[in-house]
Image: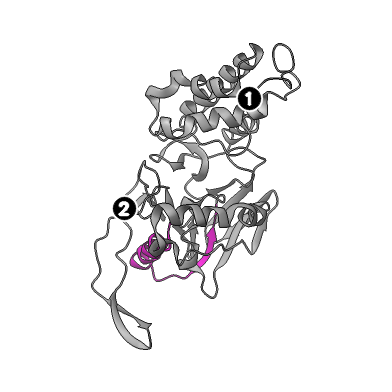
Amino acid sequence: MGMTAKFGAISALTFAWVGGLCQAEPAPEPLPVTEVAPGIFVHTGAAALMTRANAGAIANIGFIVGDDGVAVIDTGGSVREGRALRAAVGRITPKPIRYVVNTHAHPDHVFGNAAFDQGGVAFVGHKNLPHALSLRGQHYIDAFRRIMGDELLAEVRLIPPTRLVETEQTLDLGGRSLRLRAWPPAHTDADLTVLDERTGTLFAGDLVFLGHVPVLDGSITGWLGVLDRLATMPARRVVPGHGPVSPWPDALAPERRYLERLAADVRGLIAHGTTLQKAAATAGASEKPHWELFEDYNARNATAAFSELEWEEDAPGERSRGHAK
């Protein structure tokens, strides 16, 4: 998988003006990162919910170093985590950060953006990302302020991309090309992937989950269709949104199995006139032993799948518009 680099605390001090006084503050400790391929560095997030204790550090985030600059791929679940990631970049290379790429709008991937909002940094995202942030971003901030506290959320700002990806786009880091691809609704309606062509490393965002149960916030049929196309990408390894860096495309198998099982269960329950509440409690249950955080997300996934599949034209049995919910 390549060399491993882990970095401890640095002793330099930074200075911040507080109430008109100059106060010394410890520089952020660099986030631990692993070099999964030459020039590709990843921090693996915890398999957990976002909390005050973990500062929202639950998603895989990282950066890619080219000859002329750096691209950061997602920034974490708080500005604190974002600063630690920025410190990790500085520990690895003096080259400037040129791009911050957000793979979608969920808080664990974008709440660290403000740590990188400095001159010369372009924010890049799916064409739908600005709308997704404007529609739900403030709700995310308010909700996680209650969970994580004012201190961690005070500096979070919604920073929409200044460079939009309609279908495909290439970023040049100097001797290193990154192929960005925007996908139709799947995990969300603003999913973006990043393929480093030099090493065949695919940053898949939350289009790929390993260990952590997949989270459905877009379209289950769309996601299954995207997996078929995603599998054809010429990658050697994948950095999933959650879970370990893994060989490609074998890493897709557990997620595909889960989504297919969930869709089949929901369709069967719809065909038998089952209510949404019962479907939420039972669909996908056979997958529980295979996934972390299953109890936190599966019922919500089943509810979203039911709401989508009860209206599909080719649902088995009679159409279900009249089902009680």
For residue 43, say whether it is visible: yes
Location of mark 1 (residue): 325
**The N terminus: image quadrant:** top left
Q: Is residue 62 left or right of residue 140?
A: left
Query: On screen, 139 above or below 249?
Result: below
- Near mark 2 (Cα within 10 A), the count class, few <14, some 14-19 or many ≥20, is few
Q: Is residue 166 left or right of residue 251?
A: right
Return the x and y of residue 134 as percentages of the image width and height.
64, 57
> What segment carries the magenta color?
76-102
**Residue at figure coordinates x 29%, y 55% from the top left:** 5
Query: On screen, 139 above or below 187?
Result: below
Are the residues tagged 1 and 2 within 8 Å (C-beta)? no
Q: Is residue 182 left or right of residue 252?
A: right
Task: Kindly state the secondary structure of the residue where label 1 is placed.
Answer: loop
- Which is nearer the N-term, disc 1 or disc 2? 2
**Residue at figure coordinates x 56%, y 33% from the top left:** 231
Location of mark 2 (residue): 53
In the figure, residue 46 lies in which quadrant? top left
Camera-nearest label, 1 or 2: 1
For residue 68, say whether it is visible: no
**The C terminus: image quadrant:** top right
Q: Is residue 296 magenta?
A: no
Query: On screen, 195 above or below 300?
Result: below
Instruction: Say which amino acid is labelled 1.
Output: Lys
Q: Nearer the viewer, residue 95 or 107?
A: 107
Colour setting: one colour
Query: On screen, 149 above or below 227?
Result: below
Return the x and y of residue 220 as percentages of the image width and height.
61, 30
Return the x and y of residue 119 as percentages of the image width and height.
54, 76
In the figure, residue 65 lies in which quadrant? bottom left
